[in-house]
Image: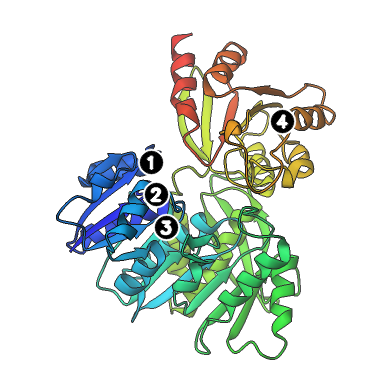
Amino acid sequence: MHYHLIGICGTAMASLAAMLQARGHRVTGSDENVYPPMSTMLESLGIPVMQGYRPEHLSTPAPDCVVIGNAMSRGNPEVEETLNRRLVYRSQAEVVKEEFIRGRRSLVVAGTHGKTTTTSIATWVMERGGLNPSFLVGGVVQNFGASSRVTDSEYFVIEGDEYDTAYFDKGPKFMHYLPELAIVGNIEFDHADIYKDLDAVKLAFRRLMNLVPGRGRLIAGWDSPAVRDVVAQFGDRLHTRLETFGTGADARWRASDVDYSGALTRFRVLREGEPWGEFEMPLIGDFNVLNCLSVIIAADAWGIPKETIDDALKTFQSVKRRMQVRGEERGVTVIDDFAHHPTAVRETLRALGEKYKGRRLFAVFEPRSATSRLAVFQGEYAAAFDRADYVVISSVFAREKGSAYGRLLDTDELIADISARRERPALCLDGADPIVEHLAPLLKEGDVIAVMSNGGFGGIHEKLLQALKSA
């Protein structure tokens, strides 16, 4: 069967492409934004990626099924060709559900923050536990060197995205994934292009929770007020087993005694106030402790011994683009991170500040995601950069295109607000090249640069490393 994926370089679409190929299908795709790590993965698999969107990409013989990515809309030449020729088309989430999940035991990892990392941890823990899971993650899991895998196991681990499914299906992707276990780690307002307010986001997660069967588990992050609120809305009508986790005493599963002083982060787990286990992991940050705790609960539900869980956590290698060290030159460390929500920016910088204590921390941020381009978090972003010693904000991505969803982020106002909170003023520069030109002469041995964007950011990481090497 021939599948053609429109928007193939999106993280979920590229992963689906690999899965379909593993099933023996012929796969082609097209995209106009082709950048690593997904473009690199597709190239390594030999999957043809056509640059741009053109009707001839659907040439005779037509594909058996066209998969339309959620970033595509009416007016896209390939979407229009699909409709005009009455070709069979599906969303990415529909294909995943029917080709790979139905009939299997599914763990869906959801929440505003930490989905990719948590799903990756869960995948590795289930692997070491002997479950041999299939998986689909929104990033490259370094233990596997892949973002997806298809096996003959009955277990499936998947990242549950709350973003809409397709232009013809405005419900969240995670509503397609048939959860037996669902992790909802946290809920905040995000995706201002599709959700009106926090209540709309909470409603989406409530619908997900309502899909978990009676024999399943809802694993709920109890440190998140919005998660608590959504669970409370069910009253006595939550017809599944609830497992709460967090740092507070009222969570059924609690992380305590977190120690970052060694080569590995150590923490204890209490269940109903009683010691349950001790674990170590190579990740940093309180948020990653909670990510691991949620996976511990899921693994226990699927019968994996705690000793095996601990062994898996110790050997977890993280995910590309999540606090990933891209390289070092002249003693300067360049880090790549996907953070774009103000909470993610704040927690990423806090964790890096702990890991690289005593070293200057430079934060470089590109407002690129649909929400970060908007002014909805204008005030929240200022405090998010407090942990950084030096802050550079790039101009808003594709500012000239404006936005149909509200006022764009005012970078001048943001720079003023950040500068008012620190001795050294922040700067706004127009893209990767000016930023590299400005920073390269300032950097000294021991400095750490955290580059945060949900896109390719003009290849800034390699440009920084090359500039340092050439200096």
| x, y percent for residue 139 | 43, 50
Q: Mark 1 points at which residue?
A: 37
Question: Quick one: quadrant of the N terminus?
Answer: bottom left
Q: How far apart are marks 4 and 2 (CA)?
A: 31 Å
- Report crowding for label 1: few under 14, some 14 to 19, many 20 or more residues within 10 A (C-alpha): some
Q: Report the mark closest to the observer, 1 or 2.
A: 1
- Residue furthest toward the front? 84
Is residue 462 placed above or below 98 in the rendered structure?
Answer: above
**Dot 1: what SS?**
loop
Q: How far apart are marks 3 and 1 (CA)?
A: 13 Å
What is the CA distance from the residue labelled 3 to the residue labelled 4?
A: 32 Å
Among numbered discs 3 and 1, the one appearing first in the sequence = 1
Q: Which of 116 and 307 is in front in this view?
A: 116
Which residue lies under the disc numbered 3?
A: 137
Residue 150's quadrant in the figure?
A: bottom left
**Cα distance in 3D space between marks 2 and 3:** 7 Å
Query: Residue 266, image x and y in percent?
Result: 59, 55
User: Tag 2: residue type?
Assistant: Val
The residue under label 1 is which amino acid type?
A: Pro
Please tell me the numbered disc located at residue 140: 2
Q: Where is residue 195 in the image (x, y as percent from the top left)?
A: 65, 60
Q: Residue 411 carries which label?
A: 4
